Image: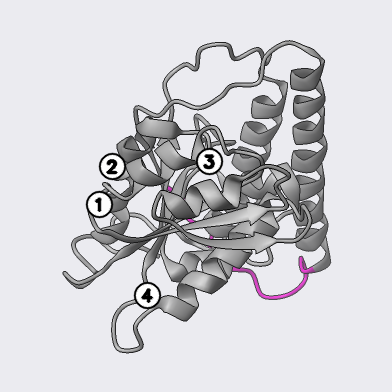
Amino acid sequence: MASPGPSQTPTQRVAVVIPAKDESARIAATVRSARAIPHVDLVLVVDDGSEDATQHVARDAGAVVVRHSHNRGKASAMETGAAVVAMRDVEDAPPRLLLFLDGDLGESAVHAAPLIPPVLDGIADMAIALLPPQTGAGGRGMVVGLARRSIHAMTGWLPSQPLSGIRCLTREAFEAATPLAHGWGVETGLSIDLVSKGFVALEVPCDLRHRASGTDLAGQLHRAGQYRDVLLAVNARRLRRMVTKSGPRRRTSRAT
């Protein structure tokens, strides 16, 4: 749905939304770095039921903080963050773009800045960070492969990093994808839903660093949870497509 050339006004601002759980060791550096990103005038941390001091550390670093009393998952934290940003938007100004960051990016968070111009200028509705190889990553590509194949099969678009959660979206695009897919399936669901509806997605290289899942038991359990949630998100969208198959069909657009 993005159109070539500038489509946003010069006063368009950006809100950073950071879903976080038990990130007290890194959240301060992430918040301070995010505040330095051009066009950002609001950094919001959604503390998703942390058992450590994440909310206090984030607030001391300059973030607006909202907290879930118990862990509700990444998708819920993203929806809470977007709702709070909407309440803070100025009535007569364009709604802020939403830049979702991970809480463990630390000082590298500022390097998410390249995601903003394509969305700000109307080239894309959703810009997704392409990360360099991460030190210590121990996955074998099963979850990535499932997500990539599924997105391609359902939209015609073949992303390089379908699980990247560091994304900048217009408010229109975000609302078109809600309710979001549960848990770790949120990124795959976002891509399928938006590209299927004609929104334009674009992958942008960003020099970001985060804590990678290793090969220990915790890392294996994390990837198993990812695989489950991605599969659930894909199957839910396949079922929805089957149910609505006989009705009017939306135009599908292949993103750049």
Q: Nearer the viewer, residue 108 or 52?
A: 52
Q: Secondary structure at mark 2?
A: helix
The range drawn in magenta is: 244-255
Determine which residue is flagged by label 3.
Answer: 103
Determine which residue is flagged by label 4.
Answer: 95
Q: Secondary structure at mark 1?
A: helix
Residue 23 on the magenta segment: no
Q: Residue furthest bottom?
A: 92
Q: Residues within 10 Å of mark 4 (few under 14, many from 20)?
A: some
Q: How is the image coloured?
A: one colour
Please give left or right for residue 170 compared with residue 213 in the image.
Answer: left
What residue type is disc 3 on?
A: Gly
Please give left or right for residue 54 compared with residue 180 in the image.
Answer: left
Q: Residue furthest left?
A: 10
- On the image, the x and y values in percent for residue 199 come to 46, 60
Residue 117 got which mark? 1
Residues under labels 1 and 2: Cα distance? 6 Å
